[in-house]
Image (cartoon, helix red, strand yellow):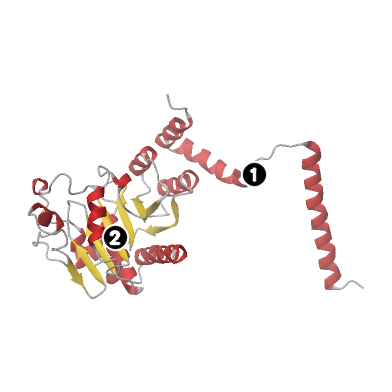
Amino acid sequence: MINERSINSAVKNKLKKYDEDVISLLEKSDLPDFDYRHLAQLDRLETIGTRWPLLAEIALSQREPSV
Amino acid sequence: MIRVAVQGCRGGTGASSIIAGLAQALVDAGERVLCIDLDPHNLLRLHFNHDWRDENGWANAVGNGQSWHTASFALGSQLHFLPYGHSDTHVVPTNALHADDWQQRLDELDEDSYRWVLFDLPAASFAQEHFPADVTLIVAHADPACHVLLARRQFRESDYLLVNHFAPSSLLQSDLYTLWQAQYSDWLLPWTIHRDEAMFEALAHKRSVTAYRSDCLAAQGIRNLAAWLLARHEEAA
């Protein structure tokens, strides 16, 4: 009989295994780290740039190296 | 004595209204506060029920060779304010706004007289970078003009950016706020002061917004600011 405690334990083990798998994959493939948390924000910022030309112009000037 | 300078990113951002509301919020929390108006427009006093015909202030006093704090006024036992005074700039010596002079003037005060000294700095032209403040709040509207001016500004460690009159239903304001969250994450305060008609009505009633309508959205934003300052300086102490 499966009780609640054994289900929780099974879920935890599964999650732990998932974490370990991801970590080991990253380590094995030597993938570079990237800022995945801000993808939604980057999308939004890109949209803002297309919507308002002045904001895009300022953002561009801030990216250019100062002479 | 904790020195807080409030400066508009440009004119008309509501810096004086925020100072007046903040002073009242700090007094409500049991603090002793002195407000000093360094803006020649001489408007801060009007938030404190002062007679608009009375043009006495620290600038006149300094110009006439008197002590700078002779023109201070009391509003209850916890709140004092010092108007700028006559707005005719030739009365004011050119060095009267000099940061070193204000450091000396503050040194003249008894350390226990006030826990908070709030300065209303004039916008833009005033060289605030050497001003003797522990915290400088830069007040901005989420509009393109402030965006341009902020892009030119060098932020210091003690600077914080506060968005006033924020209307989240405006697409442009919402976009600018998102942009600032990304660009100025180290300086942008994590709440805004919402656009609220009570802010304008308060001045028409010659009161601060926190005294005029303590339950309004703008007053809530200003109380957040007071709570943040109190917590910040509790930690520092």
Disc 1 element? helix
CA gap, disc 1 and disc 2: 42 Å
Disc 2 element? strand
Q: Which residue is mark 1?
A: A36
Q: Position of residue B26 (x, y in %)?
A: 34, 69
Q: Residues within 10 Å of mark 1 (few under 14, many from 20)?
A: few
Q: Chain of mark 2?
A: B
Compared with B98, B216 (above or below) is: below
Q: Position of residue A8 (x, y in %)?
A: 81, 67
The quarter holding residue B110 reads bottom left
Residue depicted at x 83% and y 54%: A17
Q: Is residue B216 left or right of residue B109?
A: right
Q: Nearer the viewer, mark 1 or mark 2?
A: 2
Q: Choose between B55 and B51: the one closer to the eye.
A: B55
Q: Choose between B58 and B140: the one closer to the eye.
A: B58
Q: Which residue is mark 2?
A: B118
Compared with A44, A17 (above or below) is: below
Q: Position of residue B221 (x, y in %)?
A: 39, 63
The quarter holding residue B222 reads bottom left
Q: Chain of mark 1?
A: A
Quarter that holds the C terminus of chain A: top left
Residue depicted at x 80% and y 42%: A25
Q: Choose between B63 and B231: the one closer to the eye.
A: B63
Circle 2: residue type: Leu
Q: Choose between B59 and A65: the one closer to the eye.
A: B59
Q: Is residue B74 left or right of residue B186?
A: left
Is residue A21 visible from the viewing direction of this image? yes
Compared with B59, B219 (above or below) is: below
Q: Residue furthest top?
A: A67
Q: Residues within 10 Å of mark 2 (few under 14, many from 20)?
A: many
